[in-house]
Structures are given as structure tokens and as C-alpha cells.
Image (cartoon, rainbow, N blue to C red):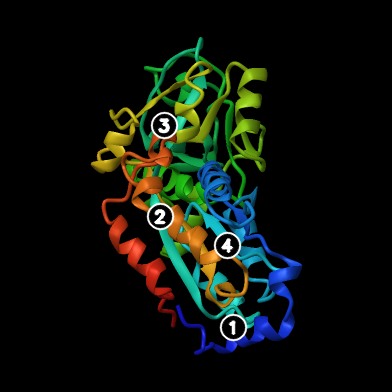
């Protein structure tokens, strides 16, 4: 492999630290708590199977990881950002302004967002409408927009038990939160017809209506969790009425403590996500600073190992943990091998 043709950003990192390989010889990763267990599995296996130190993998959420990723180029910045959503245009812009211009997007597979509660508690069969009516700050009642009056799940849906609404959802720095807002809360708002009422109330402004739909109540019934899923689980263990939002893989590794709800009549599973039947699923990613390849030892090797058939394929350890293997994994492997960067405006 030749590194003769250096990009401007590659030259920048070399200039920032001519001793990067000796000053920092391990890959540094941060970001999504959903991707964290997969990245940790890969990092440990990488350290055991390659002549490179084990990569350091930290959590913090997709937004926090991408913020660190976009701080600049050099050994004092992370090499990889894990994300449970695609990088946003404003983040790409922030990256570029800090000199991070060549970004490689790597899709590792798919995961579902599930709704789980204490294994000994009530079972639920949810729809997006149920969650919208339970958590939105304001809903339409008898044609009028009012503060959400619902206190129990029976208030939301008479088929449900009169269990107090207590939801533990990912905080705003998590990519899972954005998917939850779009595919559950906003979808429920649209299905009820409230979206059209909110659009009229906001001067026919679609964006304003969307923002109003996903504005959640602040009376304690909806609690943001800024930590990872272990914190959500701890909250449910302390409050048996609680229902948490989790990644499928986390739930599947805690079935002795949690029971999962259906969503729109579909049980979440790797199979229902792979077929697209389960409605609340999303691709998972990590992003690589191309300028760090060839400077930080083992970076490309780590990425190639991560998306190899043996690791990310349907029979690999990531699938065993709960990742839904990407049917287009070969394309992702080619992106990493070719160091193909994202096309940005």
C-alpha cells in the first residue's frame, strides 16, 4: 500500500505530530452507546489477533462522538466516531471547518429500537400512536390543542392496563433519540391527524409542526437517559412501572430481566428487522478520519477487521450479540479497502 500521495489533511496530521506513531500507537474510538458493545467486541478481538494495541473504545452518544471527531486532525483527536444514525450536514460542515475534510462512512449492519419493561410486569402491544399520545407535550383533544392530560397507559389506549406512564428514553445526544422521534413520535402524530392541526396552528409551516409533534412532556413521565442502556435498565429495576427504549441487542442480552413489546403487531427480532417488517429499525455506522490512516497504526486494519465476513457477517460474533448483518456488506468492505470518502456538497 502506498502513502506517497498525501491529501492536505494527511499532511496536516503529519505536521501536527511527526511522532504520532510513537506518541499514540492505539486507535481511539468514541460515540454511540448502541454501537459500543459491537465496537468493544471488535476491539478486543483485534488486540488479540493483530500486532497492534487494543483500540480504546468510549461511549457518550452519537452526537458527542461526532463532535469529538470533528474537533480536528491530529493525534490528540479521535480516529473513529461510532453512530446510530448518519452524520448530519451541519456536522460535516463543522468537521470541514476544523480540517476534517476526508471522511469514510462505514455501515456495519442494522439494529432495532425496542420497548421493554420489567419481565414480571404487564405486557404491551404498542403502535406509534400510543407513544405519541403518552409522551407528546401537547395533543389534540376534541379539536383543541391541549397539554397532554394522559396519566396512565389506559388513558392512552383503553386496551392497556391503568399503569402509570413512566418512560425512560435516550437523551438528546443519542442517535437512538432521533430515530425514536422520527419513526415513533412523529409517525404517531401523523397517524392521529394531529400533524395537520399543528401545521395549521403554525402557519402551514411543516418544520414547525414536526418540531411541535416531537416536543415531549416535561412533567416527569418522560425521562431522558443520558447514559447507556445499563442506566435505563437500572431505572426500570428501581421503578417496575417503567418502560424503556433500548437497542434490540441489549434487550436480547437481558431477557432474564426484560420483556419486549410488539410494535404495530410485529415482534422485534433480527429476522423481522432483516426483512424490514419491524417498523423501528435503523442502520449503524462508524466514521473514519482518512487523514489518520497510515499515521495512527492499525486504523485501517481495525476498520477492515470490523466489517470482515468473519466479524460482521451473519455467522460472526456481532450477529451472535444481536447485530443484523448488512446484506450489502461486500460493498462496505470495498469502501474501506479503497478508502473511499463521502461525497459532500
Residue corresponding to mark 2: 307
Cα gap from disc 2 to disc 1, whole angstroms: 24 Å
Residue corresponding to mark 3: 130
Provide the secondary structure element on which disc 1 rests: helix
Q: Is 167 situated above or below 199?
A: above
Q: Position of residue 149 (x, y in %)?
A: 55, 30
Q: Residue at x 35, y 62 (%)?
A: 332
Between 230 and 317, the residue placed more toward the observer is 317
Q: Quadrant of the C terminus?
A: bottom left
**Lower position in the chain sequence, tag 4 or tag 1:** 1
Q: Position of residue 147 (x, y in %)?
A: 57, 39
Q: Nearer the viewer, mark 4 or mark 1?
A: 1
Between 218 and 250, the residue placed more toward the observer is 250
> Does 310 sit left or right of 221 as displayed?
left
**Lower position in the chain sequence, tag 1 or tag 3:** 1
Cα gap from disc 4 to disc 1, whole angstroms: 15 Å
Between 85 and 193, the residue placed more toward the observer is 85
**Lower position in the chain sequence, tag 3 or tag 2:** 3
Amino acid at each position: 500500500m502506498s502513502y506517497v500521495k498525501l491529501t492536505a489533511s494527511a499532511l496536516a496530521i503529519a505536521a501536527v505530530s511527526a511522532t504520532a506513531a510513537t506518541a499514540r500507537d492505539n486507535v481511539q474510538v468514541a460515540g454511540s452507546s448502541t454501537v459500543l458493545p459491537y465496537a468493544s467486541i471488535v476491539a478486543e478481538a483485534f488486540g488479540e489477533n493483530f500486532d497492534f494495541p487494543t483500540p480504546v473504545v468510549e461511549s457518550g452518544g452519537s452526537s458527542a462522538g461526532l463532535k469529538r471527531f470533528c474537533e480536528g486532525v491530529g493525534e490528540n483527536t479521535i480516529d473513529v466516531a461510532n453512530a446510530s444514525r448518519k452524520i448530519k450536514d451541519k456536522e460535516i460542515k463543522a468537521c470541514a471547518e476544523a480540517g476534517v475534510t476526508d471522511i469514510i462512512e462505514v455501515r456495519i449492519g442494522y439494529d432495532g429500537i425496542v420497548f421493554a419493561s420489567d419481565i414480571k410486569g404487564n405486557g404491551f402491544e404498542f403502535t406509534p400512536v400510543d407513544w405519541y399520545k403518552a409522551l407528546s407535550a401537547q395533543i389534540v383533544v376534541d379539536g383543541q390543542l391541549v397539554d397532554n392530560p394522559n396519566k396512565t397507559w389506559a388513558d392512552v389506549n383503553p386496551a392497556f392496563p391503568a399503569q402509570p406512564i413512566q418512560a425512560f428514553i435516550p437523551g438528546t445526544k443519542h442517535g437512538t433519540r432521533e430515530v425514536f422521534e422520527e419513526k415513533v413520535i412523529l409517525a404517531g402524530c401523523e397517524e392521529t391527524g394531529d400533524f395537520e392541526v399543528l401545521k395549521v396552528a403554525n402557519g402551514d409551516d411543516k418544520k414547525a409542526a414536526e418540531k411541535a409533534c416531537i416536543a415531549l412532556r416535561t412533567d416527569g413521565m418522560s425521562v431522558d437517559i443520558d447514559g447507556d442502556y445499563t442506566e435505563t435498565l437500572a431505572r426500570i429495576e428501581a421503578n417496575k412501572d417503567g418502560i424503556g427504549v433500548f437497542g434490540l441487542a441489549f434487550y436480547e442480552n437481558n431477557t432474564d430481566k426484560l420483556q419486549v413489546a410488539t410494535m404495530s403487531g410485529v415482534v422485534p427480532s433480527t429476522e423481522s428487522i432483516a426483512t424490514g417488517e419491524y417498523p423501528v429499525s435503523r442502520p449503524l455506522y462508524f466514521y473514519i478520519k482518512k487523514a489518520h490512516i497510515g499515521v495512527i497504526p492499525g486504523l485501517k486494519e481495525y476498520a477492515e477487521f470490523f466489517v470482515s465476513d468473519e466479524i460482521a457477517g451473519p455467522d460472526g460474533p456481532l450477529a451472535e450479540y444481536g447485530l443484523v448483518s448488512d446484506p450489502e456488506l461486500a460493498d462496505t468492505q470495498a469502501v474501506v479497502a479503497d478508502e473511499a470518502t463521502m461525497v459532500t456538497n
